[in-house]
Amino acid sequence: MAFEEIKAAIDALMVEIAERPEDRHVLQEQIRVKLAELRALGLPVPADLKQFEEDLSDDDDDDGFDNVPV
């Protein structure tokens, strides 16, 4: 798959996230797979997608608990 096809697939997944936020985690994993495809093919990962991937990692670290005793 060429760079433009993978980029288009990622863009479509991002639109789906906006339309179906309840499926966000599944769709985010699909985006990670597409980014891995880019890297495996030796293609550049655009800066905005690198930032998005970093933001996803930050979200994964936040499990919703603040670890404060009650």
Image: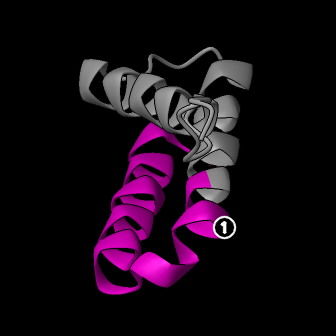
Q: Position of residue 36 (x, y in %)?
A: 69, 31
Residue that appears at 53% across and 43% down: 2
Q: State how the image is colored.
A: one colour
User: At 45% across and 22% down in the image, what residue appears?
Assistant: 54
Residue found 28% across the figure and 18% down from its top: 47
Q: Main secondary structure of the magenta part?
A: helix
The image position of residue 32, as x and y in percent, is 63, 41
User: Is 17 on the left or on the right of 22, as rendered?
Assistant: left
**The C terminus is located in which quarter?**
top right
Q: Is residue 4 magenta?
A: yes
Does residue 17 show up magenta in the picture? yes
Q: Eyeballing the image, is 10 above or below 19?
A: above
- Name the quadrant containing residue 15: bottom left
Mark 1, other Cα within 10 Å: few <14 / some 14–19 / many ≥20: few
- Which residues are the magenta region? 1-28
Q: Residue at x 62, y 43 (%)?
A: 63
Direction from residue 34 to residue 6 in the image, left or right: left
Q: Name above or below for residue 12 compared with residue 51.
A: below
Indicate whether 21 appears above or below 43: below
- Determine whether 4 is above or below 54 in the image: below
Amino acid of disc 1: Val
Tell me the element at label 1.
helix
Which residue bears the numbered disc 1? 26
Residue at the extreme front: 70
Please count the marks in the image.
1
